[in-house]
Amino acid sequence: MDEAFQPADGEYETRVRQSFGRQMVMKTIGATMDQVSPGRVVLRFPYNEKFTQQHGFIHAGIVSTVLDSACGYAAYSLMPKDTGVLSIEFKVNFLAPAKGDGFSATSRVRKAGRNIIVVDGEMSAHIKKSLD
């Protein structure tokens, strides 16, 4: 169950979305910020062959990059204005290849400390069903 977090800045959503808009790597990938709430962010990006590995799956580096941003912004949503966020530790478990028409990265703050915020993130694929 998610803990109810209170942002330190009442304008957190605007600040988070503006910061995300300055991330050129997310623009390159085609990622968008779908949802922002205190301690939770959802990013989405479409399948793009340019970001695949040799078997046609989205490269693990791309998956990790999007998850890192999603988790960072979930943490940033709780931080005071005029602060910044950087990852200090990052672990990824890949349970299946990244295959689909599009992807969502959902991140949730698990523990908000004074200096360190612990966040979990999960990537899921979206597959359009054909009408064959």
Image: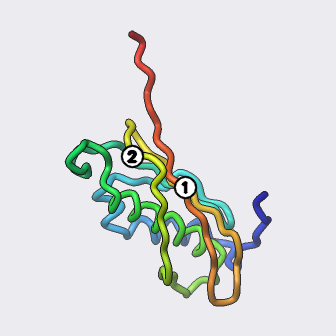
Q: Nearer the viewer, residue 14 or 95?
A: 95
Q: Sequence-wise, which precedes: disc 2 or disc 1? A: 2
Amino acid, disc 1: Glu
- The secondary element bearing badge 2 is classed as loop
Q: Nearer the viewer, residue 46 or 80?
A: 46
Corner quadrant of residue 9:
bottom right
Q: In the image, is residue 82 above or below residue 20?
A: below
Q: Nearer the viewer, residue 31 or 116?
A: 116
At x 26% / y 52%, what residue is drawn?
A: 51
Q: Residues within 10 Å of mark 1 (few under 14, many from 20)?
A: some
**Inter-mark Cα distance, 2 to 1:** 13 Å
Residue 97 circle label: 2
Q: In the image, is residue 101 above or below residue 80?
A: above
Q: Position of residue 30 (x, y in %)?
A: 34, 52
- The secondary element bearing badge 1 is classed as strand
Corner quadrant of residue 26:
bottom left
* 40 with respect to 89 (left or right): right
At x 54% / y 55%, what residue is drawn?
A: 122
At x 62% / y 85%, what residue is drawn?
A: 116
Residue 122 circle label: 1
Q: Nearer the viewer, residue 58 or 104?
A: 58
Name the residue at the top extreme: 132
Q: Position of residue 104 (x, y in %)?
A: 49, 48
In this rendering, the label closer to the viewer, 2 or 1: 2
